[in-house]
């Protein structure tokens, strides 16, 4: 569920698909999928989701130019119940206008919306925005498209890595991030947006942001600068295979991308974009991307692209499972009730930090609600190194604890704040290097801790604190000491929590349940609900009574929701599959520290979605 380097750092479409066709055209295993007798008629739509298909220039040539091929392709993709098709033209040849117009007219006659698409790349890859030839090529492509379409989407190759003499001279003493983000915004405004609108004043130009947010500004993307320039925004999910492909993006990050960048775009947010590039044999990981788009309530779901979902492409092997799941996607979208809720996490636009930390936190059952501005009011909020993009961060954090609120920091952020007042909240007597052990100590209440043995060892950055004040809610235990994993301390009128992330980020999902439950407990008061169980299960609360659970593990997961004990008792139901629920009042802790809670428990199958509601 990851891409190749930057975005999908693949070859431009024409080069990529020609190679795929040559290599795989003889594969008998990828014969065309036979349409079922109950396949939906062309023009059918889903009730609650909107779907679209991206066609590269090669897809247009191979699948849509010939009327017979077009009819066959539309029949093949009919189970997706498409509302729109995006047509790329990579040539920029005015002679292509007539052919594009003929295809678009036929598709519209069949009840489909049709938009144009441009991939700002050449045979050499990313463009140089100081090269007149590259800018002329970009202009030529959008001028052709604007003659045919009233909407053009810009694929996420709108970036540059160029280090030519002109680029170095233009950068001067500035950073690449500052220079390229300014350069690409200026040049795309002139040679892309303005060029298209000169041809067709009605045309709407949509920017698609790649999922590799940590390299946005370094390579010319700048959400804060570009969203106001463009008419619409599409946000890449493209988590693909999370642990094997080279971007290593956890599944839940796809949800956060939509809520973070799409939420900032407001009414300009048009779509979520996902693909199955190089995902043959990873059906569950592929549809996991669609679940994230549905749960984020994406206005439109774009499937990239026709060529990789259609034989002879190897990744076309994912298509039957996608078709099988489509009714469930639509059904879930129709069930979602009320606004999405989550823990505020501070993610300023253009920020970078611990790579995809919000995705890992989401995958241990902490629902994320990204905020681009400082979350001053909520009782609890999460802060990572991304927060350092805010120049007033130290003062704002101090004001939060003075006001009696809680701040939940990553250890790496606290290290950066060492010279601030908040950086003095913990009495750290030793740090540096790593420690490893399979034993944890989890504090249950002030005087009592539980020793937990994991089946294997875990490695963490070394944090050693003094005995008093006692701050170790969760510690990694070795013969020579207890080392901080989750640290909590009162400070001024509020509280400071510090989470030390394991060396292997995915180990966060594999920690013992009691350790994960202690982390989740930090946000119980803020959310009014917490997950109990293993990692790899995400929680998505909606409104005040609906909780969606998604098991992203390859095996079953026994999980439970814990809520404050309620009177009168509610009636609980699982709506997606009518799964059996066990509801009971439980007591956690002992004596004066005992807490009564309501527990709603069930078992989730691998990659299963459940919708739990209280009536």
Image (cartoon, rainbow, N blue to C red):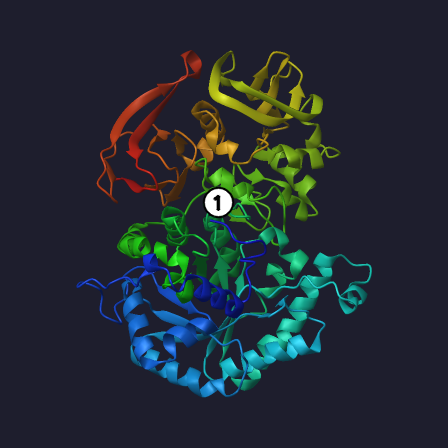
Q: Quarter of the image holding residue 128?
A: bottom right
Q: Which residue is farthest left?
A: 37
Whether residue 298 is visible, yes or no, is no
- Is residue 281 found left or right of 186 in the rendered image? left
- Is residue 587 found left or right of 579 in the rendered image? right
Q: Is residue 46 above or below residue 441?
A: below
- Is residue 251 found left or right of 79 in the rendered image? right
Q: Where is residue 517 in the image (x, y as percent from the top left)?
A: 44, 27
Whether residue 44 is visible, yes or no, is yes
Count of all numbered marks drawn on residues in the image: 1
In front of the other: 417 or 185? 185
Q: Where is residue 1 in the image (x, y as percent from the top left)?
A: 46, 49
Please name the residue that numbered disc 1 is placed on.
Answer: 242
- Is residue 246 found left or right of 525 in the rendered image? right
Q: Where is residue 333 in the image (x, y as percent from the top left)?
A: 32, 54
Q: Quarter of the image holding residue 590?
A: top left
Name the residue at 47% across, 14% down: 450
Name the residue at 23% across, 43% down: 577
Q: Is mark 1 on a helix, strand or loop?
A: loop
Quarter holding the C terminus is top left
Q: Is residue 190 above or below residue 479?
A: below
In front of the other: 574 or 37? 37
Q: Where is residue 276 in the image (x, y as percent from the top left)?
A: 43, 56
- Few, some or many C-alpha atoms within 10 Å of disc 1 (few <14, some 14-19, many ≥20)? some
């Amino acid at each position: 569920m990851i891409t190749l380097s930057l975005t999908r750092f693949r070859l431009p479409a024409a080069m990529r698909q020609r190679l795929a066709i040559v290599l795989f055209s003889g594969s008998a295993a990828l014969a065309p999928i036979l349409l079922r007798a109950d396949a939906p008629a062309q023009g059918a739509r889903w009730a609650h989701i909107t779907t679209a298909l991206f066609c590269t220039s090669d897809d247009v040539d191979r699948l849509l130019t010939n009327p017979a091929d077009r009819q066959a392709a539309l029949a093949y993709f009919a189970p997706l119940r498409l509302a729109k098709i995006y047509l790329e033209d990579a040539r920029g040849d005015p002679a292509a206008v007539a052919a594009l117009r003929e295809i678009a007219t036929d598709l519209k006659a069949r009840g489909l919306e049709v938009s144009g698409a441009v991939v700002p790349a050449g045979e050499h890859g990313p463009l140089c925005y100081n090269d007149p030839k590259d800018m002329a090529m970009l202009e030529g492509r959008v001028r052709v498209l604007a003659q045919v379409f009233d909407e053009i989407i810009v694929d996420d190759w709108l970036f540059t890595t160029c280090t030519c003499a002109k680029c170095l001279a233009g950068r001067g003493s500035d950073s690449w991030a500052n220079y390229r983000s300014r350069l690409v915004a200026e040049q795309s405004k002139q040679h892309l947006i303005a060029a298209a609108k000169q041809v067709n004043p009605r045309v709407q130009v949509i920017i698609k942001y790649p999922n590799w947010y940590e390299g946005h500004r370094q390579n010319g993307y700048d959400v804060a600068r570009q969203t106001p320039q463009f008419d619409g925004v599409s946000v890449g999910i493209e988590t693909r295979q999370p642990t094997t492909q080279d971007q290593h993006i956890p599944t839940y990050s796809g949800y956060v991308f939509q809520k973070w960048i799409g939420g900032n775009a407001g009414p300009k947010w048009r779509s979520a974009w996902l693909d199955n590039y190089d995902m043959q044999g990873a059906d569950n990981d592929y549809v996991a991307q669609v679940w994230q788009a549905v749960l984020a309530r994406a206005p439109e779901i774009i499937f990239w692209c026709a060529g990789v979902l259609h034989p002879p492409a190897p990744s076309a092997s994912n298509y039957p499972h996608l078709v099988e799941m489509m009714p469930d996607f639509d059904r879930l979208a129709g069930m979602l009730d009320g606004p999405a809720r989550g823990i505020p996490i501070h993610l300023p636009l253009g920020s970078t930090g611990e790579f995809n930390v919000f995705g890992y936190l989401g995958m241990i059952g902490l629902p994320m609600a990204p905020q681009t501005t400082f979350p001053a009011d909520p009782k609890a909020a999460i802060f990572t190194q991304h927060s350092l993009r805010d120049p007033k961060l130290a003062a704002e954090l101090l004001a939060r604890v003075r006001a009696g609120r809680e701040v939940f920091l990553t250890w790496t952020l606290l290290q950066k704040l060492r010279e601030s007042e908040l950086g003095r909240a913990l009495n750290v007597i030793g740090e540096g290097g790593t420690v490893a052990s399979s034993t944890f100590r989890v504090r249950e209440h002030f005087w009592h801790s539980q020793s937990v043995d994991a089946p294997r060892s875990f490695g963490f950055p070394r944090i050693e604190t003094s005995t008093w004040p006692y701050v170790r809610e969760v510690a990694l235990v070795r013969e020579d000491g207890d080392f901080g994993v989750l640290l909590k301390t009162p400070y001024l009128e509020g509280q400071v929590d510090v989470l030390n992330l394991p060396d292997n980020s995915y180990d966060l999902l594999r920690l013992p349940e009691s350790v994960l439950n202690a982390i989740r407990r930090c946000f119980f008061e803020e959310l009014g609900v917490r997950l109990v169980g293993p990692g790899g299960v995400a929680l998505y609360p909606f409104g005040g009574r609906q909780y969606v659970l998604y098991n992203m593990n390859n095996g079953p997961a026994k999980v439970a929701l814990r809520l404050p004990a309620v009177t009168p008792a509610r009636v609980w139901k699982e709506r997606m599959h009518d799964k059996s629920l066990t509801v009971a009042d439980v007591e956690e802790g002992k004596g004066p520290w005992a807490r009564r809670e309501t527990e709603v428990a069930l078992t989730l199958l691998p990659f299963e979605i459940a919708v739990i509601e209280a009536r």
